[in-house]
Image (cartoon, rainbow, N blue to C red):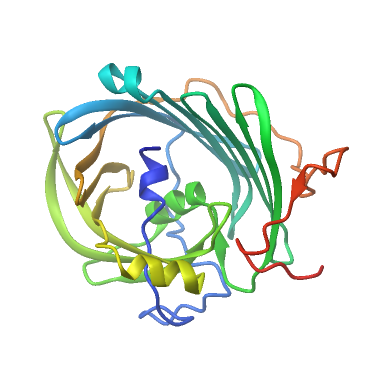
Amino acid sequence: MAFLFIASATWFIPVNAFGTNGEDKSRSLPIDPDFKPRLGKYYYNVNFNNVSIGNATIIIDRDGELYKVQVNAQSVGMVDSLYRLRYRGEATMGTDPLSPVEMKTQQEVRSKEKDLTIKFQDNGSIRTVEKKSENGNTVTYDMRKIQTDRFTIDPFTATYLVRGLDWKVGVEKVFDVYPGKYQYELRLRCDSLVTVDINGEKRKAWVIIPKVTNLDPQKRAEALKKKPASSKIYVSADELKDVLKFESSHPLGYFRVIMIRFDPAVEAPKEVAPISKEVNIPASQGDIKNKGGDVPNKPE
């Protein structure tokens, strides 16, 4: 169970190439020009069926013209003894217009580890390098590439987009998300405006209903045989647009992520050198497997 935004990255549902508001899915969705995320560190508690199973932090930083989002999560308590999980993810993005640059994740579950790097090209090409290891030994080293003319972002950039959109009850937005193996379509609908209690503080929040579908026909057919999870995202209805809470109900139980506190950044952001959009190719090609069934490969 890779919680927090690994869980909330499975948000989406099918439909045509346009959202109900008529957005052209080949273009970035317009972000509220007044939205400037506060820089600093968010703390979250993760619980399952009202039992604390982990904690997570999200760091928002700015390097020159780029924003960086870093997520760290780990299991705690009895869960950590039985199912030890450590997760670290980082994404770099431009915001004018919103454009993903690179996403990296490192996941450790018991003795198994997975490292993933996704690099987004200006021409719509997305390259992925994935390495899986067990007990310190490399098991697989896979490379994948897709070509898309649809507006597609990584899961962490998606969380920035959710915060930056101008929400009102009834508004619905649709775009694509690529976590590294399959491409998904994400539909977000603003359901209501409510008041939530966050650590004793009453805050107004937009309730966003996410639905997701895998764009691979075979995986989509498999998903139709299962009961989908019912999820809600609570985004504060103020200039901060904090992600206050994430809830998901499915056959196994009730999953919840709640914001605990926020620590503002204390240092001025540093300039950053431009990030290369080339994927490093390993010296030895013998252990590389191109999984053609994962995503459609197209020649450059």
In the image, taking residue 205 as reference, residue 222 lies left or right, namely: right
In the image, taking residue 58 as reference, residue 44 lies left or right, namely: left
Residues 61 and 279: in front is 279
In the image, taking residue 162 as reference, residue 255 lies left or right, namely: left
Asked whether residue 126 is in view, the answer is no
Total marks in image:
0
Q: Residue at x 31, y 26 (%)?
A: 54
Q: In this view, does 171 lie above or below 141?
A: below
Asked whether residue 217 is in view, the answer is yes
Q: Position of residue 189 (x, y in %)?
A: 28, 67
Q: Is residue 129 above or below residue 72?
A: below
Q: Quadrant of residue 84?
A: top left
Quarter holding the N terminus is: top left
Q: Which residue is drawn at 76% across and 36% down?
A: 273
Q: In this view, does 72 lie above or below 25?
A: above
Residues 162 and 221: in front is 221
Q: Where is residue 204 in the image (x, y as percent from the top left)?
A: 17, 48
Q: Position of residue 163 (x, y in %)?
A: 38, 52
Q: In this view, does 288 lie above or below 222?
A: above
In the image, taking residue 240 as reference, residue 191 lies left or right, namely: left
Q: Which residue is drawn at 27% across and 27% down?
A: 53
Q: Position of residue 181 (x, y in %)?
A: 57, 55
Q: Quadrant of residue 44?
A: top left
Q: Residue at x 71, y 67 (%)?
A: 297
Quarter holding the C terminus is: bottom right
